[in-house]
Amino acid sequence: MPYPDIGRAPGLLRVLFVVTTLLLSSTSGAAVRETRGNLVLDGVPEHSPRVLATLDGWLSGRSASFQDFLPDGSILISTRFGDADQMHHVAKPGADRRQLTFDIDPAAGASANPAPLTRQMLFARDRGGNENAQLYLQDLDTRQVRRLTDGQSRHGGALWSRDGRYIAFQGNARNSVNQDVYIVDVASNAAPRLVIASQGQTWTPLDWSTDGQRLLLLDYRSITDATLYVADLATGALKAVVLTANPAKPAPQTGIGSARFAVDGRGIWLSADLGGEFQQLHYLDLLDGSLRTLTADLPWDVDDLEVSSDGRWLAYVANVDGYSELRIADLGAGTTRTAKGLPPGILYNLRFDRQGAKLGMTLETPTAPRDAWTYEIETEQATRWTMSEMGLVDPARLSPMEVFRYPTWDRVGGAPRRIPALIQRPAKPGRHPVVIDIHGGPEGQSRPGYSPFLQYLTAELGYAVIQPNVRGSTGYGRNYTMLDNGRLREDSVRDIGSLLVWIAAQPDLDANRVVVMGGSYGGYMVLASLIAYGDRLQGGIDVVGISNFVTFLTNTAGYRRDLRRAEYGDERDPAMHALLRRISPLERASAIRRPLLVVQGLNDPRVPASESEQLVKKVREQAGEVWYLAAKDEGHGFRKKNNRDFYLRTAATFLERVNASR
């Protein structure tokens, strides 16, 4: 039954009630289960009075993401004034944000029709986090919205042709598994036309040629294995793009990030590793096959790139130890310079304006939320267009983020391998409890961005927060990314063990009060860490995590299955099936003896809710303590503010309780 209202009860009564609830949820045979709107609470106690009094002010802020320029030089952004991100128009720097889309689910991926006198916006929206995104066209003058896709399949990668007449996109409407390429004529009411059918490829459109006759397509098999193709739209012919700096020694596989046609159509600008360590910036001449590298001296990945409409400027972002460096190449002069005036942090969503004179982007730092910025190429002037409110937060209380490296268990070149990580420390002296926050992916990277919740943990609850980039993370070279593939999976878990050793050696960190948290693959890492190092951990927070690799690969959405097999291994192979079962947390759930918070979106197509539910059941059968929080209107993570705030209140209550238990 629902908990009684104790909000007005005397303080001592509230404390007694919460303690009693915690004891019942952990020691009784049946956890208390209730539904509150779209949230399902199973064994979740009432939130801590301290958390209720302090957390919401930190979560009341917002952020803004740059989307695109309109023909008049104004911009489109996404931000939130209600429960979910919607598209807004900003006329000039510092101007009001005028809302354009309205819905209970967030709008994403907006782009403006590039035709000079046309005011149209393309955007995507799914339902309840199911990731079956539909594409919508909105007239910005009449506000009329038209759905372009079938209303049920998955769509993405939408690109305008240079004249604004057509949109190319990927979709799985044909059989729900294969990612095909479609084109829709925005001036007609005709259904999208299938132009490139997948024969097992995972197609993503990357660019239109200037004349609208060709599409640049990516066939993505894994983060280290992809191929570019040029599609002739008149004939349907596909030609694979051969990438090699040395024709005598072509790379067997290459990881590809971004790619764009040169404006004259003769070549392609791209970021790729060519079988080497880092995704560098290259130019491929399509006529003679020659390939030249522009960033051979850069020992870091190129994350993003854009070419101006006149072909003069090439902008790209270097990922330097997690921080973004924006660089501008003058292709005519053959010179490159680093952008000035941008605060150190991470930036993305690069896009030039119609004249090619200004670059738009999203930028965030460890102490400032995402906002829309522009950069004037000629004058080198950086301008912040939006000033997102940080809520009831004193900026002086925000903690900086420090990059450090700790030694792990294996050796490279005769010395211990060192794992890159980020740390935020409380300002007060003393020995602090620790939250280890592990990113998902596993092909991901913890980077120096803004998280009001992590800042809250440091400022209010006194936790130091460490975000390790264990082996398998991106940003540190191809070989590092591949160190956890297949049979090497548990090596990344051992990196957490080494981090625990490092924490124990720090005078300001309390090795007896360490909690691990993470989402998706990071959720798997939480469970695996609790099994391997439960004697050194006080609890774990698992958000949409994998509990059994075999059932995960069996039940994940069909369009993702082969991509995940490339990372984790093919469960259809008997030997790999046995290994995947052996290393799965579900098989060793009896070893989880610390409190556990499990969080799940019930519409998740990536890590289905069954992964969390089978784990919760198994741990409770072993008399383990589990708080289980699920949302009926969420998928792979909580995107809606009300749901996310409730989850974060629950997580803070969990962390406060674990902290106080020592």
Image (tube, helix red, strand yellow):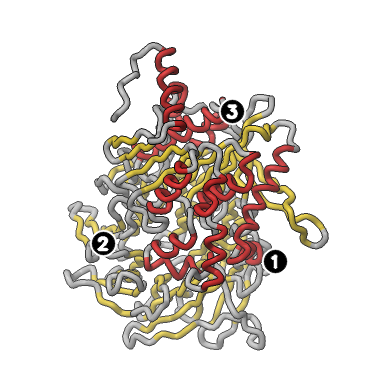
Q: Amino acid at mark 1?
A: Asp
**Dot label at residue 264:** none
Give the quadrant of residue 145: bottom left
Q: Which residue is mark 2?
A: 118
Q: Amino acid at mark 3?
A: Gly
Q: Is residue 199 left or right of residue 36?
A: right
Q: Which residue is mark 3?
A: 462
Q: Is residue 106 left or right of residue 427?
A: left
The image shows residue 433, relative to residue 548, as above or below, that is: above
> Depth check: 548 or 463 in front?
548
The image shows residue 134, relative to residue 40, as above or below, that is: below
Q: Residue 254: give x, y in percent of width and height.
A: 57, 74
The image shows residue 53, relative to residue 356, as above or below, that is: above
Q: Which residue is mark 1?
A: 297
- Please rate how many residues cluster around mark 3, counting C-alpha atoms within 10 Å: few if below 14, some from 14 to 19, many from 20: many
In this view, the mark in front (2 or 3): 3
Q: Residue 168: give x, y in percent of width and height.
A: 33, 71
